[in-house]
Image (spheres, rainbow, N blue to C red):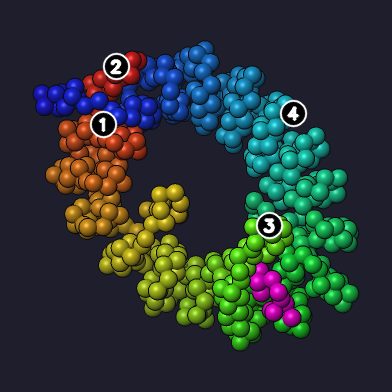
Amino acid sequence: MLARMDADALTPVHLDKVMDGLARNSALPASMVRRLFAWRRGTGDVANRPDLTEDMIAEILAIDDGRLLHSLALNERLPDRFRMRLAAHRDGAVRAALVIRAASAPRSMLEQLIDDPDPRVRTYLAQGHWTPPDLRSRLAADSDPAIRAALARHWPQAPEAVRRILLTDPEAGVRAAACSTYYAHRPYPTPPSDLLPALLADPVTRAGAVVHAVLEADTLQRLAADPDSEVRAELARHPDLPPSARDALAVDPALSVRVKVFARPDTPEHVRAQIHASVHEVSRSTADPDPDADDDTVLRWYENAFAPTELRILRLPWVTADPLPHIDSPYVGFRVSAAAGKALPADAVARLLDDEEEMVRLTMAHTAPHLVDPATAESIERRYRPRGDKFTFWWDEREVLTFPPATLRRFATDPETRLRSFAPRDPDLPPELAEKLAADPEDRVRRAVAPHRNLPLPALLRLLADSSERVAEAAAASPFLPREHMERLLDRAGL
């Protein structure tokens, strides 16, 4: 009776989000799933449910609502015959969404879409590793240079014939994407040797070609004097760079070039130390550019300002391959790279787990979570500081470290918000603790406990009317929400 009174008294503040949560609720009965098809606000996520029957899918197609169809196109369990129908839909956004989830799509659908008039569709096909190579290759001749550039960035291991077409494309942007210092996927390509002279002569492809160049004396001299700092930075990465050229680049006016020398395995330690000190000194002393400064000046200022951060975020495969000599390195990037090593002895792991730098600790914990004892795990999480609501950091998105039930229950009353939000990971969390967490002042904690199986029903119902959108949505998605309350929510929404 109390639960019924609470449900009658409480009205969701964020009804749209409650409907979105209900649409994803795995316990929502089929009859109520159908009622949500009439909801014209929110995200249309009901069409992305994995339990849709063919009759339900046909009903969604007949409704012909853009949001529902877009969500349906993203449904990985969509039967092929319905995919083919959506491939002919008039809305390009629906067809594009269909391609995003095309990993298991029939070839006939991709053949139908490869010449689609909407560039979004062809762009996703160019980017998709699931696109059959013969169809994907056709996009190298696409009329839109942006699509050819997308193909070059996302298909670095394309057949040589395709890469030749892209490397010699009449559009500079396409050539730059085909011979770049960065691609969307690894391994990175090696340009055909006969094209290297032209690629080195072309300003838009020169930087990407440098590391593949044969460093004859005149080539080395020309590249070392190139006015483009990116070219000199790529030269500083060249595996065959002579020591004399390396040492000259170690004092290059552009700090981005010095950083590349710093990262080389053959750089003497005293030179590395000099670069580290000079990067910080020059970066601190560089004045902000004038408001009317040209683009090149602003870019140089930004590169110099970012250089100390670049030193910290270096990830060095040669250090990871042989980590032991670097676990006590004075450089954060070296210790982080060492912490990514897979076969460190226990004492080295312990030192890195207790490193003064958070990124070292997190990397080591992620590399070897099975070697992190509960006390160390708690220390790492207690010392961790989130980057802020507007910045998603990978540690926030993954449950790397685990805790025993007794620790999780202790966390339920911890002063730290982050640790309280971990308590619902205990599947047997006592109902009184779950109820206390549902009244927590921090929405992160309330959201974490909303779907818990031991959360008392009155507390769950109150979360449906929570002031936080995310909490209300999580409460509506709880599979432990009774059917009668699901129905009452649909009634409130007029469904």
Q: Is residue 200 above or below residue 85?
A: below
Kind of element beneath mark 1: loop
Name the residue beneath numbered marker 2: 491
State the separation of the CA atoms marked 2 and 1: 15 Å
State the separation of the CA atoms marked 3 and 2: 60 Å
Q: Are marks 4 and 1 in contact (CB under 8 Å)?
A: no
Task: Identify which residue is drawn at 27% across, 35% down.
Answer: 466
Task: Identify which residue is drawn at 20% across, 42% down.
Answer: 439
Circle nearer the N terminus (3, 1):
3
Residues packed near mark 2 inside 10 Å, few (<14), some (14 to 19) or many (20 plus): few
Where is residue 173? Give x, y as percent: 77, 47
Q: Is residue 42 left or right of residue 381?
A: right
Q: Which mark is residue 292?
A: 3
Residues packed near mark 4 inside 10 Å, few (<14), some (14 to 19) or many (20 plus): some
Q: Is residue 254 magenta?
A: yes
Name the residue beneath numbered marker 4: 115
Kind of element beneath mark 2: helix
Task: Identify which residue is drawn at 53% across, 74% down.
Answer: 334
Res 477 quadrant in image: top left
Name the residue beneath numbered marker 1: 465
